[in-house]
Amino acid sequence: MNVLLILPMLIPLLTASLALLAWNHPRLQRGLSVFGAASLLGAAIALLTVVWSDGIQVTQGGNWPAPFGITIISDLFSAIMVGLTGIIGLSVVLYSLVSIDPARESFGFHPLIHVLLMGVCGAFLTGDIFNLYVWFEVLLIASFVLLALGGERAQMEGAIKYVTLNLLSSAIFLAAIGLLYGEAGTLNMADLAIRLGNSDRQGLTTALAMLFLVAFGIKAAIFPLFFWLPASYHTPPVVISTIFAALLTKVGVYSLIRVFTLMFTQDTALTHTLILVIAGFTMVTGVLGAIAQVEFRRLLSFLIVCEIGFLLMGLGIFTPLGLAGSVFFMIHAIISMSALFLLSGLTERICHTFNLKQMGGLYHSYPALAVLFLVPALGLAGLPPMAGFFAKVTLLQAAIEVESYTIVIVALVVSLLVLVAIARVWNEAFWKNPPDDIAGLVGRPGALQVSGARLIPLLLPVVTLASLTLIMGIAAEAILAIAMDAGEQLMNPSGYIQAVLGGQQ
Amino acid sequence: MVPETTPIVSLILRTATRYVFAVMLLLSIFLLLRGHNEPGGGFIGGLVAGIAFVLYAIAFDVESARTLLRIEPRVLVGSGLLMAAFAGIIALALGDPFLTGEWATIPIPLLGDTYLGTPFIFDVGVYLVVIGITLVIVLTLAEE
């Protein structure tokens, strides 16, 4: 079984190394990249199947027993996250085949994407808090380079903000790990859970929890630490901002959920209430920011911040149903957000701009494209029958169960405002008549700048992701069942601890 | 091409580099092998080897250092990563967790029966990655 746990890290590592060796052979690199991403998706699905049927899977790196070695562990939540990484990885790699420019490709786009995927999968699968830090660094370094790759002026500006804040967050993260190690004397997360639970200095533990909240909070772009995200995500090419939008903040959210369900559950009245308040503020600021934007990708970036609020809401509620809602929302958010980002690339190809004011007439010329936009976008706003509706219903139901009516009202109002933001994009880009300067561009044949078979890698990922949001909405029952199981596992960490430490506790 | 500024040629540095270069490479391999059981290892060995090439590039020029290396530094990084991953895969193939140290006594000509393990393969991988990365960074910067 340990093979399946290692594959999500090993496959991207091998792909990246081979792509490095094929540096001067772009065609070979592309082939390797697609093959690697497809294998990753296969491995991720296999892992999810096994975890779903047989329960939590564990392997000890180098056969060093826990808590001394590095534990690699997958519960249902981790396996779902790895599965989503696989889906997004393959979509982005396919889309990049046509859309990434030769200059960026020749400077190592493909190896970097796979290093990024390796870091993301590693962060989802590790059971060791310091190892989590290492995986964060792996994915951050790859993301730094990807963000700055190409060296355009706007990119550099975005990259500086992104790098500075992420380095700050890493420093806090590392300091927190040092303090945690000094307090508990272990780095294994399952072992930490036991020791922190038995510690008689709860005040210190709560202080440490706050440090982790800030460190992961910056990476997850929660209120009030989100400013780097809308400042940087719209600057690199579409494929790169898509993979960032889909995965990077979610690694932060994953880490928050992991440490605040496993390790820091001593003073939930303080910590989780605070998380719930932050969740509310994150939603509101995100959506208000989105309404004010005229740049397509900046608008989407603010909507990411808004979604982070919903993801945290389940953690703040801290019941099995709440966490199930978070897991369900995570699946929906990753897939619909990446669909929209990839779609923004298509509209940019047609209109030669991301500025909504200068777009228009897309519904008239490309009704199919408009549908492709509407499906994930309405899902984002939480309309049935898309997956987003059921994810939000689950979250709201969980909030009503614990009688947190304030967050229910906030979430409902925010959902309405998301709809306003979506409607704005619809009006500007799709509905209104195109402005004079691009009137000739929209609707002319070959507007996507590619034709024939080369359209497939461009359109296939968008169509697949958009239909997935619909299919998941129709099959909400099954997804909810998985999410409920994942939520139960998160709320009852004894299974996780038992799996890591075996009988020795 | 940007016209090169006149390099400060030091005869002493050049002459010394010719001798020191070989010694440094030997030292790096010594450090690599020593790391098997004692302080040392692929990382420090790789750094020393990398510095040897950097010194050569300073004493002569980047072009001749590249010629001396013969292969692209990038290839070293890729093959080093593959080698390190391979060391882990051996353990997987034998049914143990990833990166478990697998040991065997291997008869090597001239050395006799040698006790060797997969951590050594991993270390050689690290050695190659470190040389490669050092040279990718330093030589690229030196060329700018």
Image: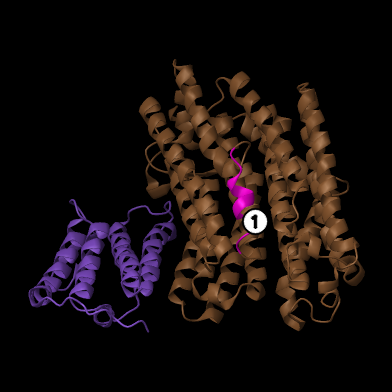
Helix, strand or loop status at disc 1: helix
Q: Nearer the viewer, residue B88 or A258?
A: A258
Which residue: 26% across, 79% down? B5
Is A230 part of what is drawn in magenta?
yes
Residue A282 image offset from top left, x and y in percent: 68, 37
| Chain to which mark 1 belongs | A
Query: Would you say A181 lies left or right of A32 here?
Result: left
Residue A481 image offset from top left, x and y in percent: 76, 41
For label 1, the residue is A45
Q: Nearer the viewer, residue A247 or B36?
A: A247
The quarter of the picture where residue B130 lies is: bottom left
The quarter of the picture where residue A85 lies is: bottom right
Q: Which residues are magenta?
A: A225-236
For disc 1, the neighbor class at 10 Å (few under 14, some 14 to 19, many from 20) is: many
Most extreme residue toward the top is A200
User: Which chain does purple denote in the image?
Assistant: B
Above-or-below relation of A244 to A73? below
Which residue: 49% across, 70% down? A108
Residue B112 image offset from top left, x and y in percent: 14, 67
User: Which chain does brown denote in the image?
Assistant: A
Q: Is residue A86 visible?
A: no
Above-or-below relation of A10 to A77? below
Type of amino acid at the residue the image marks with label 1: Ile
